[in-house]
Image: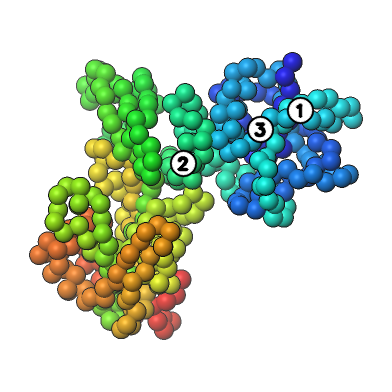
C-alpha cells in the first residue's frame, strides 16, 4: 500500500482532487524534524529540516499507480522528488510515507501559511491545475514548469470569466449547450493555440454538427488612458508591435493607451496602476471604468478591461520607459484631447482599445472636467 504525505499546497483538497482527477480522503499527520517555510523565490512552501519541529500536513492512503503518475507530472517539472519519510499520524504512531521533497538549494524566507495561501492563491491554483493536467501526455513537466506563470494568468482569467455579463437579449447558455468532444493544445509559448472539436445548440434547438475551432489563448489584459481634465490632455504611449509587422504593415509602431497583462493575484485596477509605472513612470489618480470586452472573439480568448485615469499631466513628464527584462522600449506622448481625436480621424491611431476609450472619453469629457466639491487636483485615488 502506497501512502503519501503532503505538507504544502496539495493540502488544499480541491487542488489535490483536481490534480488526481478524482475525489480522495485525507487525514491529519505530521513530519517530525521538519518545518514548513515560505520559499525564498515566491509564495509557495518549502520543507526545512529543524530538530524538534513538526511539519503539519495531510496523509493520503491507498494511493494508486495512476495517482503517482499524475502527481509526478504535476510536481516533477519543479524539481520535487519522492522520498520515504517517517510520519506521525493522529494516534501518535508512526508509519513510512512518500513525501515530495523540495529541490536542493531552494531557500526559505520566513513562515508560510496554508490559510493565507488558500485565500490569495487557492482558486487560481485549482483553475491552473486543470490546464496543467490537460497537458499530461502532451508536454513534459519541465515545459509546464517553464510556462506555469503564464498558465496562472490564464487560470485567473478563467475565474473572472465565470462571472458572466448579463444575457437579457442574447441566448442564455446552459451547461449542455456547448459540448467539447476533444480538446488539445497545438502550441504553447508566451501564448497558446488550442483546438476544440465541439458541437453547440442551434437557435432552433437542434445540435450543430461536430466542428473544429482553434482559439488563440492569452490571459486577460488591461488598458488605461491617463487624462488630465484641467489641461484637457492625455498621455499616449508608442511602441513596436509584432502583430502589424506580421500583417505586412510598414508602420508597426503604434500609438496606444498604457496596456498589459493582468498578473495572477492582482485585480484589473492593480494591473493598470502597475503598468502605468512600468510603461510611463506615472502614479495614476482615480480610475474611471470604460468597458470590459472581447476584442476579437472569433479566434481569441483575450478579454480587456479599459480605464481612463484622472491624472496630473504637466509638461515634461513624457519619456522613454519599459521593463528591460521584457525588451520594452516605450515612448510617451503628451497631446491635447482634440489632437487625439484628429489622429483617430486620420487613421494614425489604429489601436482598437485606444479608439474605444477615446470615444468613451469624448462622451464623458464634460462630466470629468466639471470640478467636484473638495477636489484640489487630479491625483486622488
Q: Any mark on residue 147, and which?
A: 2
Residue 37 percent location from the top left of the image: 72, 48
- The kind of secondary structure element at disc 2 is helix
For the residues labelled 1 and 3, the Cα–Cα distance comes to 10 Å
* Residue 116 shown left or right of residue 128 in the figure: right
Task: Give the residue displayed 9% in from the left and 65% down from the top.
Answer: 346
- The kind of secondary structure element at disc 3 is strand
Q: Residues within 10 Å of mark 3 (few under 14, many from 20)?
A: some
In the rendered image, which residue does mark 1 sit on?
A: 84
Q: Residues within 10 Å of mark 1 (few under 14, many from 20)?
A: some
Work out which quarter of the rendered image holds the N terminus and state it: top right
Residue 156 percent location from the top left of the image: 47, 44
For the residues labelled 2 and 1, the Cα–Cα distance comes to 29 Å
Q: Which of 38 and 206 is in front in this view?
A: 38
Task: Give the residue displayed 40% in from the left and 57% down from the top.
Answer: 326
Asked if disc 2 and disc 3 are in contact, CB closer than 8 Å, the reply is: no
Q: Is residue 93 above or below residue 340?
A: above
The mark nearer the N terminus, 2 or 3, is 3
* Residue 160 shown left or right of residue 10 in the figure: left
* Residue 43 shown left or right of residue 242 in the figure: right
Residue sitting at the far front: 104
In the rendered image, which residue does mark 3 sit on?
A: 81
The mark nearer the N terminus, 2 or 1, is 1
Q: Which of 131 and 326 is in front in this view?
A: 326
- The kind of secondary structure element at disc 1 is strand
Q: Which of 255 and 49 is in front in this view?
A: 49
Res. 182 image quadrant:
top left
Q: Say if residue 154 shows up in the picture.
A: yes
Amino acid at each position: 500500500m502506497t501512502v503519501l504525505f503532503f505538507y504544502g499546497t496539495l493540502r488544499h483538497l480541491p487542488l489535490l482532487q483536481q490534480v488526481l482527477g478524482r475525489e480522495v480522503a485525507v487525514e491529519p499527520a505530521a513530519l517530525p524534524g521538519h518545518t514548513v517555510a515560505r520559499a525564498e523565490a515566491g509564495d509557495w512552501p518549502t520543507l526545512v529540516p529543524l530538530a524538534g519541529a513538526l511539519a503539519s500536513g495531510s496523509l493520503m492512503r491507498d494511493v494508486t499507480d495512476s495517482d503517482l503518475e499524475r502527481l509526478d507530472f504535476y510536481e516533477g517539472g519543479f524539481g520535487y522528488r519522492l522520498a520515504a519519510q517517517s510520519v506521525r499520524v493522529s494516534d501518535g504512531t508512526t508509519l513510512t510515507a512518500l513525501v515530495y521533497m523540495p529541490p536542493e538549494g531552494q531557500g526559505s524566507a520566513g513562515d508560510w501559511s496554508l490559510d493565507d495561501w488558500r485565500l490569495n492563491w487557492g482558486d487560481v491554483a485549482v483553475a491552473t491545475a486543470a490546464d496543467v493536467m490537460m497537458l499530461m501526455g502532451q508536454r513534459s513537466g519541465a515545459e509546464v514548469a517553464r510556462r506555469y506563470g503564464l498558465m496562472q494568468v490564464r487560470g485567473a482569467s478563467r475565474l473572472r470569466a465565470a462571472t458572466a455579463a448579463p444575457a437579457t437579449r442574447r441566448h442564455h447558455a446552459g451547461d449542455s449547450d456547448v459540448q467539447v468532444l476533444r480538446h488539445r493544445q497545438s502550441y504553447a509559448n508566451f501564448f497558446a493555440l488550442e483546438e476544440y472539436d465541439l458541437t453547440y445548440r442551434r437557435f432552433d434547438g437542434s445540435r450543430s454538427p461536430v466542428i473544429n475551432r482553434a482559439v488563440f489563448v492569452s490571459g486577460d489584459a488591461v488598458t488605461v488612458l491617463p487624462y488630465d481634465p484641467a489641461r484637457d490632455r492625455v498621455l499616449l504611449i508608442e511602441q513596436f508591435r509584432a502583430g502589424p509587422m506580421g500583417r505586412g504593415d510598414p508602420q508597426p509602431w503604434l500609438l496606444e493607451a498604457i496596456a498589459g497583462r493582468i498578473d495572477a493575484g492582482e485585480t484589473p485596477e492593480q494591473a493598470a496602476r502597475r503598468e502605468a509605472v512600468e510603461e510611463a513612470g506615472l502614479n495614476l489618480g482615480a480610475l474611471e471604468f470604460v468597458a470590459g470586452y472581447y476584442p476579437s472573439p472569433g479566434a481569441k480568448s483575450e478579454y480587456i478591461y479599459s480605464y481612463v485615469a484622472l491624472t496630473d499631466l504637466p509638461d515634461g513628464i513624457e519619456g522613454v520607459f519599459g521593463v528591460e527584462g521584457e525588451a520594452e522600449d516605450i515612448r510617451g506622448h503628451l497631446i491635447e484631447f482634440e489632437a487625439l481625436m484628429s489622429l483617430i480621424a486620420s487613421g494614425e491611431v489604429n489601436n482598437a482599445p485606444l479608439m474605444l476609450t477615446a470615444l468613451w472619453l469624448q462622451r464623458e469629457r464634460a462630466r470629468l472636467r466639471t470640478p467636484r466639491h473638495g477636489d484640489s487636483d487630479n491625483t486622488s485615488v
